[in-house]
Image (cartoon, rainbow, N blue to C red):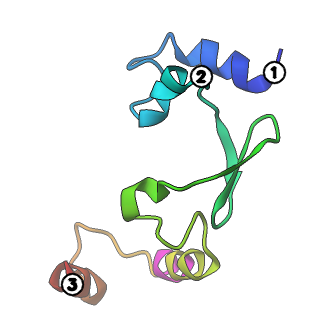
Amino acid sequence: MKTSIAQRESSRRLPPGGGKAPVRGFRAIGGERFFVAEGEEAPLIDVDGNSYRDYVGSWGSLILGHAHPAEVAALREAGAQAVMSAIRAARAAFAAAAA
């Protein structure tokens, strides 16, 4: 049994049917949900090794793609500073002002 089929069957026992994403509607167009194992920039690779082009991009928040090197570097830099939301920090004020 393919890994994606096993994960799909297992996820159906979990609310809400294994996820809230619109990909649950794949059956309406003759497809089945897949489970992503990795993604870098535009392509996604599922648990069975199939490659998909992500045209949705999480509705805009992934405009540069999945795990884009520039975003990963920025997240690593920010994470290394151990800024917590419960503590006032210059970065938090900057982010709030930018929103």
Q: Main secondary structure of the magenta part?
A: helix
Q: Amino acid at mark 1?
A: Lys
Residue at figure coordinates x 39%, y 63% from the top left: 60
Badge 2 crowding class, 10 Å Cα cut-off, few under 14, some 14 to 19, many 20 or more, is: few
- Measured as percent of width and height from the top left, residue 44 is found at 67, 52
Q: Amino acid at mark 2?
A: Gly
Badge 3 crowding class, 10 Å Cα cut-off, few under 14, some 14 to 19, many 20 or more, is: few
Marker disc for residue 10? none
* SS at circle 3: helix
The C terminus sits in image quarter: bottom left
Q: Earlier in the sequence, mark 2 or mark 3?
A: 2
Residue 86 relative to residue 48: left or right: left
Give whichever of 26, 10 is nearer the camera.
Answer: 26
Task: Kindly identify which residue carries mark 2.
Answer: 30
Residue 25 relative to residue 93: left or right: right
Q: Earlier in the sequence, mark 1 or mark 2?
A: 1
Task: Kindly identify which residue carries mark 1.
Answer: 2
Task: Kindly identify which residue carries mark 3.
Answer: 98
Residue at figure coordinates x 38%, y 20% from the top left: 16
- Measured as percent of width and height from the top left, residue 77 is found at 53, 83
- Measured as percent of width and height from the top left, residue 51 is found at 75, 48
When the figure is inspected, residue 68 is found, relative to residue 39, above or below; the finding is below
* Residue span colored magenta: 76-80
Labels 1 & 2 near each other (Cβ < 8 A): no
Q: Earlier in the sequence, mark 3 or mark 1?
A: 1
